[in-house]
Image: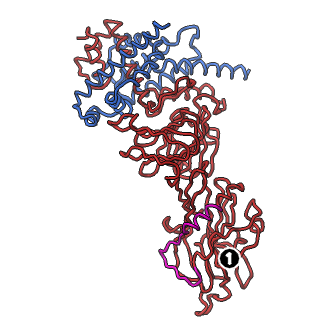
Chain colours: A red, B blue
């Protein structure tokens, strides 16, 4: 039987596929021993098996002709060779433990930026080579530079694996890429995004759907599905366009202007709370373990609620809309006073309330410097007048939300802050205040002068669904 | 002295990395042909690389790297076999030696064959490519491939076998064309 090359091939395949029986295994063994050419044929077939494994895993888009060869690490999810290539790095560590890694060296993926990162499992540091490593972060932002020149920024919560010098598996989270042609990001469900020399933003949500927005250039979005050829499931997405891939749904391409962009929900930092002015003692103070109080309360004092919202990386896009969501956690109304919403500016961390931010008037002529908001000397911007009208009651469970015009105005103000120097990770300061002082009329001492205030949810003591949020939509310019 | 030592270390690293990356596909193919358990095979490849890295200082660089690394791989597989003496399907020493020698003798072809294979895969029809992708990319069992393609499992085995044959023939043809062109 083993003199027939085709029969021999069947036996070798059965061996490789794990379906061989003892008799045929013995035949194979005898043939390999007896004839060097048979042994070579077996070796070539074994190599074919290994190479198919490698090439299928990275098959999405073959390297362009003439693309420079790099020292490539095989993907970690390949059966064969992933560990072997990883060993190169281990061996390198054995022999050159003291050589500092740089992204310029082939096969490297160097951490270049860490902002407020909370890790789950392996914790990378600045300068670490994370090629081949799985990374999981619950919060914060990490920047990675690859030896091929591509750069990515990951925002937590996120899970990913740097598979090789120009390939990443993003299981969950947000990724922004400023990448060289051929850089590839894989996602669950057989989805791959291949960079054609561009900047793009990508998000894998909790349902494992993949969303891509192209900022510059173009990408190929590919979905691998059984029974569907790769060519049938490839979409080219160009600047301004977006693509979505969901399990079993293929790719949906959204032409420029027809997609909502990327949405982000930003919860106020736990340092949020209230600032106050005690009337009797003429004293300012902050209350960062309280909810967002607007009106009169203990002191007696006038209170303003302050949100501290960490600004995200816009990743080359702009804020299209900014919807402020304020869940009511204590019912009330403010007789003769409305509730206004002001953007004071932005501050760098650590996040901390400043009592000077208090206001119980309809106008605020102070500069940001006078308010202790850095670094601009501009003035606070009232983005909503009378979010709650004078005397209007609110009930627990209500969610007060900016309307379309207000959301657009808020977005424009936030974009202006970025343009004036605000960086990702800075805190947007939003104040909610009554437009009239109330503590002199409602001191809480006598029944007819009971405190009058409204409270929205802050982050340190409320369940997540009762915390105030800012929902941003990022769109291509 | 420190500088000289560093240069030696860097030079060794470069030497080892280059040779290992060239040899690793063949070493992997040999080990995966000898050891059916994927995880064990992967561990063995790692171990071979570690053995080689830790003893590369003693390697005579004037000699070919292939026989040396294949010798390490062969010894590691033998050790593995001894530890797992209850396994029914394992090659005897003579077969192992013949297989190691065969892999070593085709090691120089590996890079050309790899490039040819990439082009040959491109030429596969949709159905064959889907089957190959499912088998190798998704590690799908024959039954799952059969379900996806509306075939029986036996038919899938046959199709995979024929596809491999076709790919091998394509590789040989491309290598032959290249050889005659040169």
Pointer 1: what residue? Answer: A276
Taking depth in this image into account, of B5 and B67 the one nearest to the observer is B67
Give the answer, above or below, for where A52 lies relative to A287: above
Give the residue at x 27% y 14%: A6
Query: What subunit carries mark 1?
Result: A
Q: Residue A173: percent from the left, percent from the top?
A: 50, 49
Q: Residue A236: percent from the left, percent from the top?
A: 48, 39
In-image side of A75 versus A477 (left or right): left
Give the answer, above or below, for where A405 lies relative to A173: below
Give the residue at x 28% y 22%: A14
Give the answer, above or below, for where B28 lies relative to A290: above
Give the answer, above or below, for where B79 lies relative to A458: above
Report crowding for label 1: few under 14, some 14 to 19, many 20 or more residues within 10 A (C-alpha): many
| Residue A129 in view, yes or no | no
Considering the numbered disc 1 on the image, is that residue within a helix, a strand or a loop?
A: strand
Give the residue at x 74% y 81%: A282
Magenta residues span A389-413
In-image side of B161 versus B108 (left or right): left
| Residue B157 in view, yes or no | yes
Taking depth in this image into account, of B103 and A325 the one nearest to the observer is A325
Taking depth in this image into account, of A392 and A406 the one nearest to the observer is A406
């Amino acid at each position: 039987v083993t003199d027939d090359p085709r029969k021999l091939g069947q036996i070798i395949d059965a061996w490789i596929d794990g379906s061989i029986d003892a008799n045929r295994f013995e035949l194979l063994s005898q043939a390999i021993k007896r004839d060097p050419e048979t042994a070579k044929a077996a070796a070539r077939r074994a190599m074919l098996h290994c190479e198919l494994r490698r090439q299928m895993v990275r098959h999405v888009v073959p390297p362009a002709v003439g693309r420079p060869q790099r020292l490539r690490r095989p993907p970690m999810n390949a059966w064969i060779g992933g560990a072997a290539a990883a060993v190169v790095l281990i061996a390198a560590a054995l022999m050159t433990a003291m050589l500092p890694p740089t992204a310029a060296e082939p096969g490297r993926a160097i951490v270049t930026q860490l902002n407020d990162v909370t890790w789950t499992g392996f914790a990378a540091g600045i300068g670490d080579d994370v090629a081949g490593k799985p990374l999981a972060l619950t919060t914060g932002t990490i920047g990675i530079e690859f030896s091929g020149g591509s750069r990515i920024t990951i925002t937590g919560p996120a899970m990913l694996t740097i598979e090789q010098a120009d390939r990443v598996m993003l299981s969950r989270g947000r990724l922004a890429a400023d990448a060289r042609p051929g850089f590839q990001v894989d996602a669950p469900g057989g989805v791959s995004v291949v960079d054609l020399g561009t900047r793009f933003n990508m998000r894998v949500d909790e349902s494992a759907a993949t969303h891509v927005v192209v900022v510059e250039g173009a990408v190929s979005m590919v979905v691998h599905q059984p029974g569907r050829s790769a060519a049938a499931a490839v979409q080219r997405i160009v600047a301004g366009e977006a693509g979505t891939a969901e399990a079993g749904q293929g790719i949906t391409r959204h032409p420029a202007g027809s997609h909502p962009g990327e949405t982000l929900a930003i919860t106020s930092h736990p340092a949020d709370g209230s600032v106050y002015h005690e009337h009797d003692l003429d004293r300012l103070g902050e209350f960062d373990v309280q909810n967002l109080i607007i009106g009169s309360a203990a002191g007696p004092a006038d209170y303003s609620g302050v949100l501290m919202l960490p600004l995200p990386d816009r990743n080359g896009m702009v804020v299209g809309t900014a919807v402020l969501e304020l869940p009511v956690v204590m019912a009330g109304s403010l007789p003769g006073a409305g509730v206004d919403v002001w953007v004071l500016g932005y501050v760098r961390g650590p996040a901390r309330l400043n009592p000077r931010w208090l206001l119980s008037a309809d106008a605020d002529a102070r500069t940001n410097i006078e308010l202790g908001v850095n670094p601009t000397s501009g003035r606070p911007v009232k983005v909503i007048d009378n979010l709650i009208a004078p005397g209007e009651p609110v009930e627990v469970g209500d969610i007060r939300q900016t309307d379309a015009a207000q959301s657009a105005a808020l977005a424009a103000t936030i974009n202006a802050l970025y343009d004036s120097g605000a960086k990702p990770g800075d805190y947007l300061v939003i104040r909610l205040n009554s437009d009239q002082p109330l503590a002199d009329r409602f001191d809480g001492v006598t029944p007819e002068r009971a405190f009058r205030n409204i409270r929205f949810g802050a982050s340190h003591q409320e369940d997540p669904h009762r915390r105030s949020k800012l929902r941003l939509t990022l769109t291509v310019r | 002295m420190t500088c000289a030592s560093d240069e030696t270390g860097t030079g060794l690293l470069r030497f080892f990395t280059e040779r290992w990356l060239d040899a690793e596909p063949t070493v992997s193919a040999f080990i995966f042909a000898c050891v059916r358990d994927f995880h064990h095979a992967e561990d063995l490849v790692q171990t071979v690389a570690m053995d080689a890295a830790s003893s590369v200082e003693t390697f005579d660089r004037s000699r070919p790297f292939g026989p040396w690394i294949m010798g390490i791989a062969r010894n590691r597989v033998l050790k593995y076999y001894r530890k797992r003496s209850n396994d029914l399907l394992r090659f005897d020493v003579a077969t192992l030696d013949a297989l190691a020698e065969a892999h070593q003798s085709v090691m120089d072809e590996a890079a050309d064959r790899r490039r040819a294979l990439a082009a040959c895969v491109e030429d596969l029809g949709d159905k064959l490519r889907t089957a190959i992708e499912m088998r190798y990319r998704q590690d799908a069992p024959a039954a799952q491939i059969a379900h996806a393609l509306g075939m029986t499992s036996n038919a899938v085995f046959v199709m995979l076998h024929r596809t491999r044959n076709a790919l091998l023939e394509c590789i040989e043809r491309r290598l032959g064309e290249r050889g005659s062109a040169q």
